[in-house]
Image: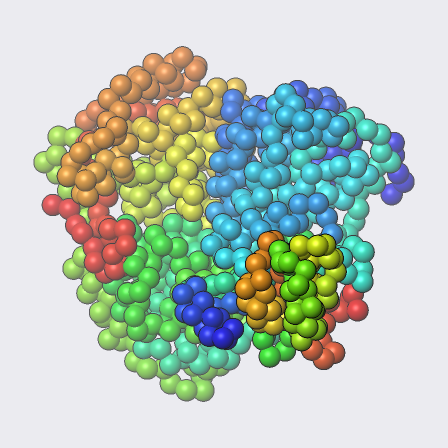
Amino acid sequence: MVSDMEKTESAQNGSTHTISLLVENKPGVLHRISGLFSRRGYNIASLTVGPTEHPEYSRMTIVVRLSSKPVEQVVRQVQKLVPVVEVRELRPEDLIERELLLVKINTPEKNHAELRALAETYEANIVDVSPDALVVEATGPAGKLDALEERLASYGIQELCRSGRIALERGFKTLAPPNLK
Amino acid sequence: MPKEKMTGAQALVRCLEAEGVDYIFGIPGGAILPIYDALFDSKKLKHVLVRHEQVAAHAAEGYAHATGRVGVCFGTSGPGATNLVTGIADAYMDSVPMVAITGNVASTLIGTDAFQEADITGITMPITKHNWLVTDVRDLARTVKEAFYVARTGRPGPVLVDIPKDIQNAEVDFEYPEAVHIPGYLPTQREEPRLKDAAVLVRGASRPVVYLGGGVRHADAHKEVFAFCELLDAPVVTTVHGKGAFPETHPLCLGMFGMHGGRYANYAVQHSDLIIALGARFDDRVTGKLATFAPEAKVVHLDIDPAEISKLVTATVPLVGNLKVLLPQLTEAVRKAFAEHRRPDQGPWKKRVQEWREKFPLKYRQEGQKHILPQTVVELLWRKTGGGKCIVTTGVGEHQMFAAQYWKTNQPRQFITSGGLGTMGFCLPASIGAQLGRPTDLVIGIDGDGSFQMTLQDLATAVDLKLPIKIFILNNLFLGMVRQWQELFYENRFSETPLTDCPDFVKLADAYGCLGLRARTVDELEPVVDRALAHKDGPCIVDVRVRRQEKVFPMVPAGAPLNDMIDGE
């Protein structure tokens, strides 16, 4: 079901790529990168940014949806930005991706047991419980979260928040240039 | 070097001196006052007071284009900084090395909508290679060092350094760094160039064309280009910024191609089986409709900017790197390939190109015309300057295209124009910068009446500096290029293009204290040109009244295939 949805989506909106960036941790860097994406017409599906093992660098994971332009063009344009130390497309077969989902379900207490069982199936946690609502937390690849989201929908989703994708390459390869290893 | 105590403003002046800056173009204002105060004591820096910051930026471009050095301009916060924006954007599109320095309100006031505050680093992010807001005076020297380095290395371009007023006043132990370390900035490429693959394509081509862009000038590689083209013995076409990259009077040179290129140049490109693009970026004004661009051609694309490779036209063999370094290597690889295998006979291709050239020359007819034709003026000026032995600057519009078509440029850095952004008003400021950068060269401007009126206030600057620039205004009392499109594509509905209320340029010149001349007829033209060229005492403005309806032909309508050209009568 999920893969079907993705297929239709990619047919309508082009291809989706995960791009990983190592950037200088300085003011305005996010603005420079998001500005480049918007003015060149690259469609951002999600963007996450956070600290790395080096305090002077941040790591960004951008999921970009491209209709006609090749992803190499995006990578090369991003590479030109001075605060971008390294950038690479992470190929789907090479990457470990995770996303965090928080979802608030508005449901009477009698359904809670059922929801707990469902959460367990998806290795999700119930992190807040009140008489007529509970909050589910789940992590995993986007596809798994999509599936969980769909299952939860019938209980009445009150509010939902997803973090966007973070990803690393499998194996020993890293993004950092030699001088940072 | 021992450290010295001084203010941020004084440190900036020392940085600019250390970078070997001679001219700065700018206007003082409240938020940049400490810098101008420090400038007052400098013996090395010469400040050119312009009358509008846009001119400061364009003059810095003209200076940079003419000399190959980094142009420098100053502006105060707010409007001073925003007035620089057009010039910065122009430099970005044409890859002109430039450092713009702006004052800003004190750092404690930033973000409070203070008087004359503008977020100029935010505004100029999309039109600079990089920009910096200096928030600590101890970062100032390093930032300026980085700014000059980024502006001139790799694919050159403009950068901006914004310095709040309190940083200018703060005390610092000054030391100018010797080395630059920017972890994310790699002006040269790491990949091994595929020279052999390129040489194989060149060797095997039976209809090759060499396509030269502004990158040849940026790399100062015209000698290397000449050697390559002579070896290939293939037709050479250029962009407007490629003019002078290869001598236009050379038999191989077909001049500019594209929207207003010669038919023969466009036909050569369209029928080629190999395009060797050197320092060019396949702009829409040269390719016409992309889907039909040179349908049978493979492409060898040599450029310093990897993001230009396969951006618009897919490169069969990309070569990323510095033209001056890579091209001689390619030349050698090609020489070797030629020695190892015979090339296909180039005779039929050269014959075909020559036939197009003879059958479809650039043409206009002055004989029997009462009015001066703009093309006549360009060709007369070219002859009167010993075959174009001078620097030409232009504005943007029909006059620019007439100049590009008829001015045969034989040397690099002699045809200075606004290509990518197409900024009207570029001519006069660029001529000021070019003349200051190359004081012994003759500088003439070929401008239009609409274009000239966009920056004419800076006649005052040229007069002030007694610059012997000569601006020839090809005056058709129209926004001519727009009028041309209205005539061709909008059923002669001349909406807001007549400029019949044009001021008297001779009186205007007089008001500014410079020589003003006018030519209305063909008979008047030559004596007026002679008089203008002989005038050495300050600038000269020549109002040349040209035929109002004259259009630039041939022309590829926007979005049409490159070989689908329309002609005039």
Q: Residue at x 39, y 34 (%)?
A: B424
Q: Which residue is drawn at 40% across and 12% down?
A: B511
Q: Quadrant of residue B5?
A: top right
Q: Looking at the image, which residue sits at the far left?
A: B368
B396 horizontally vs B177: left or right: left
Q: Looking at the image, which residue sits at the far right?
A: B2
> Where does residue B397 sit, x and y in percent of width and height?
32, 38
> From what the image shows, is residue B407 above or below residue B355?
above
Q: Kindly tell me whether residue B372 is visible in this rendering.
A: no
Quarter containing the N terminus of chain B: top right
Q: Which of the colour schemes (rainbow, by chain, secondary structure, one colour) is used?
A: rainbow
Q: Which residue is drawn at 73% across and 66% down?
A: A125
B366 horizontally vs B48: left or right: left
Quarter containing the C terminus of chain B: top left
> Where does residue A92 sit, x and y in percent of width and height?
58, 75
> Where does residue B80 sit, x and y in percent of width and height?
57, 26
Q: Which residue is nearer to you in this view: B339 or A51?
A: A51
> From what the image shows, is residue B501 above or below residue B419?
above
> From what the image shows, is residue A98 above or below residue B528?
below
Q: In which quarter of the image is residue B315?
A: bottom left
> Where does residue B418 sit, x and y in percent of width and height?
42, 42
B212 horizontally vs B235: left or right: right
Q: Which residue is nearer to you in this view: B439 or B483?
A: B483
Q: Which residue is nearer to you in this view: B164 or B445?
A: B164
Q: Residue at x 50, y 41 (%)?
A: B89
> From what the image shows, is residue A4 above or below residue B433?
below
Report how many numbered discs are placed on residues in the image.
0
Q: Kindly tell me whether residue B93 is visible in this rendering.
A: yes
